[in-house]
Image (cartoon, grey):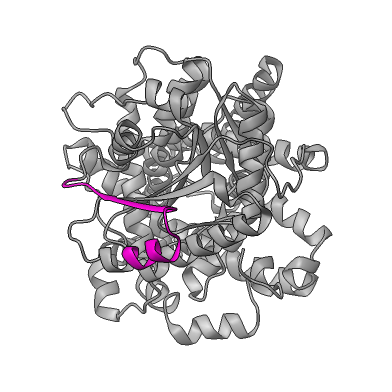
Amino acid sequence: MQRRRLIVACTSLLTAVLLSWLMARALAPGGWTLAKAAIMGSFGLASLWVGMCLTNGAIGYLMAPWAETPGARLRSDGAAPIAIAVTIRDENMEIAIPPLRRLLDALDATGNGHRFTVFMLSDSTDASEEPAIAAFQAAYPNRVRYRRRADNAGFKAGNIMDFLDHRADGFESMLVLDADSEMSAKAVLRLAHEMDHNPHLAIVQHLTVGLPAASAFPRLFQFGMRAGMRTWATALAWWQGDECCYWGHNAMVRIAPFRDHCRLPLLPNGRPILSHDQVEAALLAGAGWGVRLLPEEDGSFEANPPALPEFMRRELRWLAGNLEYRHLFGMSGLRPMGRWQLLQAILLFGCMPFYLAILAGAAVAAVTDTVSPFPAGRVLAVMLAWAGAIYAPKLLGYSQILVRPAPYGGRAQVLAGIAAETVFTLLLDAISVVSKTGTTVRLLLGMRPAWLPQNRADRGVAWAEAARLLWPHTMLGLLAFAAFASAGWHTVLWALPLAGGLPLAIPFCVLTAHPGFSAWLRRRRIAATPEELSPDPRP
């Protein structure tokens, strides 16, 4: 495993150095200016994460044909009871309960239902969910239990630990689900089998993909995410082994070690840790327990945010949680891989200010560097190489789908989905860079993050709401393109893929939530997943 990790480190670093060298050569002719130096410095720092993206994508692509497949098991050999721990907070029970009903019924059909008991673990602010849960309990006597805390101390991690301390006696493992999770009996029993036959494991989890989505925003987002995460997860399983990351849900957890080792410390400011999952995985690995990822995409699902406003709120909540990890590097009991997991989580969002600095430096160079004009053509070539590296997991995942396109409706259908998703992602990423950079600055200046209930229902977005949310992005985009226009049309073309989402942010937000556009995509099966096209679309 150490050799594999050395390969990843060296390849990532070499990629970063090569990209930085190419950018330096592109910017050097005509002499260096302050704007060029800002571009170069930001590019070099961000390239460290870009190198990791290329490395994981390439390894996942190369290892996919030889990746171990646990296989489909409809009966688990173990007999120990398993709790299904479902964390909820002000959720729509009409969305949260039906997947649990389907899972219990499917487990019963396999003869394994006796092992599983559902616990609805609520942090809701009122009791409005109780009638629906009472009906759920009546339909499955003695198999559904309910607890609502008076407060949400410790957020989700506190909710889970409270359950383990007071209600988990007699259970050896728990299946952790969120309110938007859905799993098949086959996937759950696969996790149970891994846990039963590997006593050193504390966590085993599936690759989780998006549920079939009616709305355009989650439909396009998860089409690309699914392609990229398949190669990414295959790579992680290859070089991280049983010290892998943990995503906090759709996972089987061994209760005793989790309860013993995953009581999270408070942050230096006295607040509880907002983003718990990576810390829990690092603590378990540090204590000698295994955390395993199965890069299988069948049977484990989650719902993605229905529109851009909800997506931004989720991403900014994750960003706030991940940035808290900077306080935890010195925590005792962590192995080197555990500390890397925390750093990797920070880098996922921490590079965003550098991306924005590259764009800002280019805009300034376009206006001010009259002696040394901005070399748009040369920089464009380097940025295309950069984009190929950062999107390598997704692009290589698409190439795998194109080899066997039938589950996605055929090759023409897949190519249409790739085209639509690529435009969608380029526009979305520009918006996200600005939002995440602004939030990063506010957090570093002392802003307190919040853990708020989430809207999971499809909806449209009014022009007024989009304008209130995205007017700063729009103004920044207009200013940037005015600067690029001063240097000529070729510079504007250079900037379109990188920053085109900024002046288009408001119509992008409205369009990707519009029922008519969503219906148009569905009718043409653009960005459809195999589950949507299956005769039985339910997982």
Q: Quadrant of the N terminus?
A: top right
Observer able to see residue 299: yes
Give the residue furthest to the top: 332
Give the residue furthest to the front: 141
Is residue 142 inside the magenta stretch? yes
**Picture quadrant where residue 137 is located:** bottom left
Q: Which residue is rendered at x = 36% and y = 79% of the image?
A: 460
Relative depth, front residue between 164 and 496: 164
**Figure check: 120 above or below 294:** below
Relative depth, front residue between 384 and 185: 185
**Figure check: 430 above or below 416:** above
Relative depth, front residue between 393 and 279: 279
Segment colored magenta: 133-151
Where residue 516 appears, as percent x and y from the top left, is 48, 87
Q: Quadrant of the C terminus?
A: bottom right
Q: Is residue 489 left or right of residue 235?
A: left
Is residue 457 inside the magenta stretch? no
Observer able to see residue 37: no
Q: Is residue 498 left or right of residue 223?
A: left
Where residue 130 appears, as percent x and y from the top left, is 26, 63
**Picture quadrant where residue 60 is located:** top right
Where residue 389 appears, as percent x and y from the top left, is 63, 43
Where residue 335 appears, as percent x and y from the top left, is 49, 15
How many numbered circles does the render carry?
A: 0
Q: Is residue 175 left or right of residue 52?
A: left
**Picture quadrant where residue 195 is located:** top right
Q: Which residue is rendered at x = 49% and y = 66% of the image?
A: 218
